Amino acid sequence: MSLFEVFPDVFQGITTLLHSEPKVAITRIFLIILGFTMMYLGRKGVLEAMVMVPMGLGMATVNAAVMYFDPLGIHPSGMSTLFLEAQVGAGVEPLQAAADTVQILGIDWLQPVFTLTFSNNLIACLVFMGVGSLLDIGYVLARPLICMTIAIFAELGTLVVFPLAVYFFNFQPQEAAAIAIVGGADGPMVLFTALVLAPPLFVPISVVAYLYLGLAYGGYPYLIKIMIPKRLRAIKMPPPAKPPTAYNSMEKMIVAAVLCIVLSLLLPIAAPLIFSLFLGISIRESGVKPLQDLVSGPVLYTATLFLGLTLGILCDVNTILDPRVLPLLLLGLLSLLISGIGGILGGLFICWITGGKVNPVVGIAGVSCVPTTAKVAQKVVSEDNPSSIVLPLALGCCICGVITTAIISGIFCSLLKADSSFLVTLQQALGNIQ
């Protein structure tokens, strides 16, 4: 047997590429190149490296490692990989997916990660807990009204895209809500909302959300410079009457506990993520350093690593070529863009009512994405006035952005669940309009 005869069986990645439909082959090559680009931009600091590096490598690898293998009978062509099958996104019940995992544990090596942590939102809770352990709620207490006002403005994208997705793209209200929440720029909250309201769209929404959250780091500076003139970007802010460091750990822990209980009482459907965030904050303020080091170190970084890696692996050609992905891409981008505009408008509003004492660039930090948008705000301001420090207020806006996104997500999930009378009324109204 010659080398040319065994080549297709040995090097199946190349064989499946050559035997694929042209659009599939071109998309695979594009995604491999995109994966390398994401890794490069993450390493250069243009995108968020902690998510983009594993996500980029996973995206490139999963589109290269396609072979003739279909253990679950999902792909008609028989082409698959040894990573995972997005069973929940395909409409398979989570418990059945967990049972299948036991059987294919040694085949699709990321399947347990997806089924036991990703598809049930555990990984989102772990990320939130780790993020909370890094947040100083004193930044919110120093200027609570300013932070919350800006965060409310920064939810504009979510509120605008929801009706657009329903009326112009014919998404169901639950699907439209899951897509619109991308504008809150809070990855774990997007995962949670999509899993509760739109399980069949869970995978593409998750992929689109994290792709755009990484790109926001590179795109928002241009939006700031377009909307805010240089003289306002250079404003040097006076320190608050009571700085964040003036609040002791006991005060911060009490505030965190009260907020957690109140929000959970109002929106119990979002309680797992609310609890995870404020548990992390409480651990930070508890004074138990080994516990804080555990949550802010191994827990956060391990969860983030597998979150980025799983998302990258989910970016295979079958997901990207799903006809539902294109409107998701458009609506997700629009939601984040409008939220950024809303946040900046909120910053300009606060600048105006305070007589120019607040730098309006902090408005972008209302689009939570903790702490990315806060770093974006400080980076842009430092270019125009190196002596201006806006990071403390920006972090406060970021934290409030997480809270407002949790509130809106909880409202969506409560109003649009399957047995909700509000959903029935809304569907009847939409039917009458159509």
Image: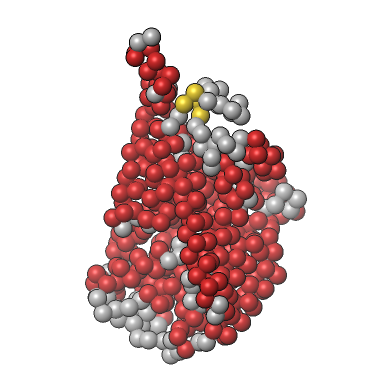
Residue 96 in the image: state x and y as whole percent: 70, 39
Residue 82 in the image: state x and y as whole percent: 51, 34
Q: Quadrant of residue 287?
A: bottom right
Residue pictured at 40% horizontal, 83% vertical: 354
- The residue closer to the viewer here, 250 or 240, is 250
Residue 420 in the image: state x and y as whole percent: 74, 53
Residue pictured at 34% horizontal, 53% vertical: 42
Q: Quadrant of residue 171?
A: top right
- The residue closer to the viewer here, 134 or 333, is 134
Any part of residue 151 in sight: no
Measured along the vertical axis of the image, is residue 350 above or below residue 195? below
Residue pictured at 32% horizontal, 78% vertical: 389
Residue 257 in the image: state x and y as whole percent: 63, 77
Q: Quadrant of the C terminus?
A: top right
- Label count reads 0
Measured along the vertical axis of the image, is residue 209 above or below residue 76? below
Any part of residue 389 in sight: yes
Measured along the vertical axis of the image, is residue 136 above or below residue 264? below
In the displayed orientation, state which residue is furthest to the front: 1
Q: Quadrant of residue 239?
A: bottom left
Q: Is residue 71 left or right of residue 392?
A: right
Q: Quadrant of the N terminus?
A: top left
